[in-house]
């Protein structure tokens, strides 16, 4: 899938490769944390991408099904080094999480009594909560530039948390508000200007000028080539499996199921978690009740996108229905298959759509709509943070629906005070002392293992 032009800048592919490796191994904390990592490295530290360029790419990725952070990495990689850069950034973003969850899935399936893993998870979960809150603050500080954007974020939070409205409806509503509000109020709905440094210097003063990243012009020839290659890569393996194994085989069922998931996962992993869990447990029997939360814990506490939980679901399903293969081999192959059909579409959306989206950067009405969408997404991510806090800190959370509202009410006597203390410590380490994510996560994991040892869980 060659591109017809190469950006005219001095950033070598090798330099970018090391940056994408750094992004990949620091991509903890879900989409908010991952987006914040990319912003900090590419916009604030390296100054390779301007603030407005970053937000424009982010807004497009928010509209797509699939993991927005992985797609943002792919988009920015493409912006710097076209197809080679996009593939490199996107693949590296997934790779650490894939390896981590594969190892944990093997331990979970074959050595579940190895509760050292439980101790590590126990300490990391509250730390991830603190990382998500930090990321919400960092993104919100830039996206919520005035009271109108703040109002959109609050409305989005209320809509998804209390009214349980679907994510696509919230995004569509925000886009409409942006279009109408931009026509009336103009600059109030413009994308937030660059963040200011200590001396007020704007982030727009980048090492690489925007014109050096000018995108290729979209063309029918290139678009059809990208579409054909990606569709073959996506559906080719499924067709081979279908012809050789038959419709009822677990690999075929997983390939088809997660391919459907790849085009409906608007709003990220949490938005489709309930549907995926119900189908995996009740319809297909791939998981036992409660195992989805264990898989989500793996995805939340390892680098990479949260939707990587599909890999755990695929592993456990094939492990239980291995056919003629050894269970561990079947599970590993299923992990590869589910990852493949989940992420190939992500590359399709970016490599096909990015040139068109780049040509629309100067359309003010579109920028107004996308700015409002970004503000709404801050509210949606805050909703995920609250949801995660409730389920990470309380043993029981009840759901009530009075007067058409959805209320998540924890049973206060089930609060885990030790987990709360770990979370507060992580919050202080990140916000007060500026400790890095990796250091904070390792420290909290060590505390978690210590707590389990203290409870005698790891002792014979």
Image: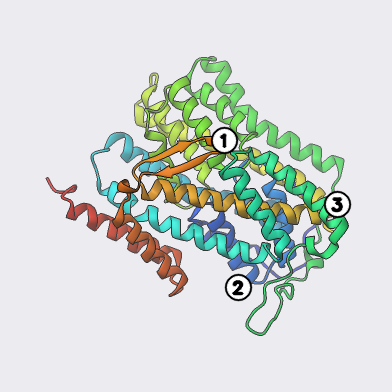
- 209 or 451, which is in the foreground? 451
Q: Is residue 187 above or below residue 255?
A: below
Q: Position of residue 252 (x, y in %)?
A: 53, 22
Disc 1 and disc 3 in contact, CB within 8 angstroms: no
Categorize mark 1 by other alpha carbons within 10 Å: few (<14), some (14-19), many (20+): few
Query: Which one is closest to the eye, mark 1 or mark 3?
Result: 1
Above/below status of 432 relative to 452: below
Give the distance between the C-alpha atoms of the residues marked 2 and 1, in whole angstroms: 49 Å
x and y, in percent, of residue 292 in the image: 42, 35
Give the residue displayed 86% in from the left and 44% down from the top: 219
Q: Nearer the viewer, mark 2 or mark 1?
A: 1
Residue 333 shows up from this direction: no
* 103 lies above or below 142: above
Q: Is residue 57 left or right of residue 116?
A: right
Q: Nearer the viewer, residue 35 or 318?
A: 35
Could you give the CA–CA distance between mark 2 and mark 3, rounded to whole angstroms? 29 Å
- Residue at image x 42%, y 32%? 315
Name, please, the residue furthest toward the bottom. 199
Residue 425 higher or lower than 179, as above or below: below
Q: Residues within 10 Å of mark 2 (few under 14, many from 20)?
A: few
Visible residue check, residue 194: yes
Give x and y (percent) for residue 135.
54, 61
Question: Mark 3 packing: few (<14 Cα in 10 Å), some, or many (20+)?
Answer: few
Residue identified by numbered label 2:
45
Q: Quadrant of the C terminus?
A: top left
Q: Which residue is mark 1?
A: 403
Q: Which mark is residue 217?
A: 3
Measured from the top left, where is residue 344 in percent x and y? 62, 39
Which SS class for mark 2? helix
Q: For numbered disc 3, what is the local secondary structure?
A: loop
On screen, residue 227 versus residue 255, left or right, reads right
Q: Earlier in the sequence, mark 1 or mark 3?
A: 3
């Amino acid at each position: 899938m060659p591109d017809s032009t190469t950006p005219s800048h001095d950033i070598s592919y090798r330099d970018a490769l090391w940056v994408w490796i750094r992004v990949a191994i620091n991509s903890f904390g879900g989409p908010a944390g991952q987006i914040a990592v990319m912003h900090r490295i590419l916009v604030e530290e390296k100054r390779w991408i301007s603030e407005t360029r970053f937000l424009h790419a982010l807004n497009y990725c928010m509209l797509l099904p699939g993991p927005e952070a992985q797609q943002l990495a792919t988009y920015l990689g493409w912006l710097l080094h076209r197809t080679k850069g996009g593939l490199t950034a996107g693949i590296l973003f997934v790779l650490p999480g894939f390896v981590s969850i594969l190892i944990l899935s093997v331990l979970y399936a074959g050595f579940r009594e190895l509760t050292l893993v439980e101790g590590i998870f126990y300490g990391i979960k509250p730390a991830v909560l603190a990382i998500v809150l930090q990321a919400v603050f960092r993104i919100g500080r830039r996206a919520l530039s005035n009271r109108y954007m703040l109002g959109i974020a609050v409305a989005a939070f209320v809509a998804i948390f209390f009214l349980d409205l679907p994510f696509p409806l919230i995004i569509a509503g925000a886009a409409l508000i942006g279009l109408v509000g931009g026509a009336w109020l103009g600059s109030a709905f413009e994308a937030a200007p660059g963040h200011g440094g200590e001396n007020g210097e704007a982030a727009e003063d980048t090492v690489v000028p925007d014109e050096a990243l000018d995108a290729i012009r979209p063309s029918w020839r290139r678009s059809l080539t990208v579409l054909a290659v990606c569709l073959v890569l996506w559906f080719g393996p499924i067709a081979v499996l279908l012809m050789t194994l038959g419709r009822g085989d677990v690999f075929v069922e997983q390939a088809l199921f997660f391919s459907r998931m790849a085009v409906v996962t608007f709003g990220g992993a949490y938005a489709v978690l309930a549907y995926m869990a119900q189908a995996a447990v009740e319809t297909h029997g791939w998981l036992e009740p409660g195992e989805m939360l264990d898989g989500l814990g793996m995805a939340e506490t390892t680098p990479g996108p949260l939707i990587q939980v599909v890999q755990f679901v695929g592993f456990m399903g094939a492990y239980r229905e291995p056919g003629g293969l050894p269970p561990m081999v079947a599970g590993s192959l299923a992990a590869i298959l589910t990852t493949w059909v989940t992420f190939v579409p992500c590359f399709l959306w970016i490599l096909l759509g990015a040139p068109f989206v780049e040509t629309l950067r100067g359309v003010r009405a579109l920028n107004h709509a996308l700015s409002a969408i970004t503000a709404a997404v801050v509210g949606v991510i805050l909703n995920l943070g609250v949801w995660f806090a409730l389920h990470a800190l309380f043993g029981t959370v009840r759901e009530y629906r009075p007067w058409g509202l959805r209320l998540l009410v924890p049973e206060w006597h089930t609060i885990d005070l030790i987990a709360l203390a770990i979370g507060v410590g992580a919050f202080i380490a990140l916000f007060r002392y500026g400790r890095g994510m990796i250091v904070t996560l390792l420290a909290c994991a060590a505390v978690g293992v210590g707590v389990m040892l203290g409870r005698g869980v790891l002792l014979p």
